[in-house]
Image (tube, rainbow, N blue to C red):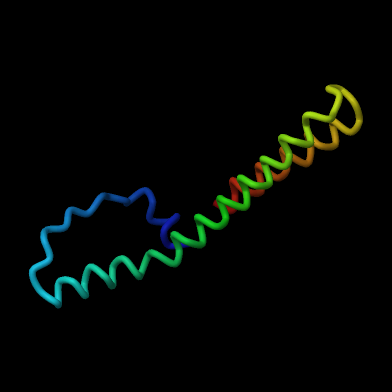
Amino acid sequence: SALIENWSNFSIRKYVAIVSLEQRKHYKDDFNAEYEEYRNLHNQTDKIQMNFSHYKEQWKSLTAGSEAYQVKKDKTVKTVFHHSSVL
């Protein structure tokens, strides 16, 4: 995604007070150009957080060293690597 690719070039823009309709439109266009991608990334991170909250609850019922524990551990590690490559 463009936002992710440009993250290393990210800088905070310093806007001055809006004094014209043209300037307002420019700021609004800048905002709208990035907002949809922001919402998509936000939704992805919400889903990831919910998944890990679910995993955390499942971990509580497992015995360390058991086969079920190892399966859950492997699945969790795989999920972490998948999400880190997506984001």
Q: How many badges with numbers are in the image?
A: 0
Q: Where residue 35 sits in the image (x, y, percent)?
A: 39, 64
Indicate whether 85 appears above or below 31.
above
Front-lying residue, 52 or 13: 52
Q: Is 23 displayed left or right of 84 in the figure?
A: left
Q: Residue at x 84, y 29 (%)?
A: 62
Q: For residue 26, what is the image quadrant?
A: bottom left
Residue at the outermost right position: 67
Residue 19, horizontal then vertical, whole percent: 8, 69
Q: Which residue is located at x 38 percent, y 51 percent?
A: 7
Q: Quadrant of residue 60?
A: top right
Left or right: residue 55 compared with residue 15:
right
Q: In the image, residue 1 lies at what x, y percent?
A: 48, 62
Left or right: where 10 falls relative to 17:
right
State the residue at coordinates (35%, 69%). Answer: 33
Q: Is residue 43 above or below residue 57?
A: below
Residue with the most extreme left position: 19
Q: Residue at x 68, y 46 (%)?
A: 51
**Residue 72 image position (x, y, % from top left):** 81, 37
Q: As rendered, which of 82 and 39 lies closer to the eye?
A: 39
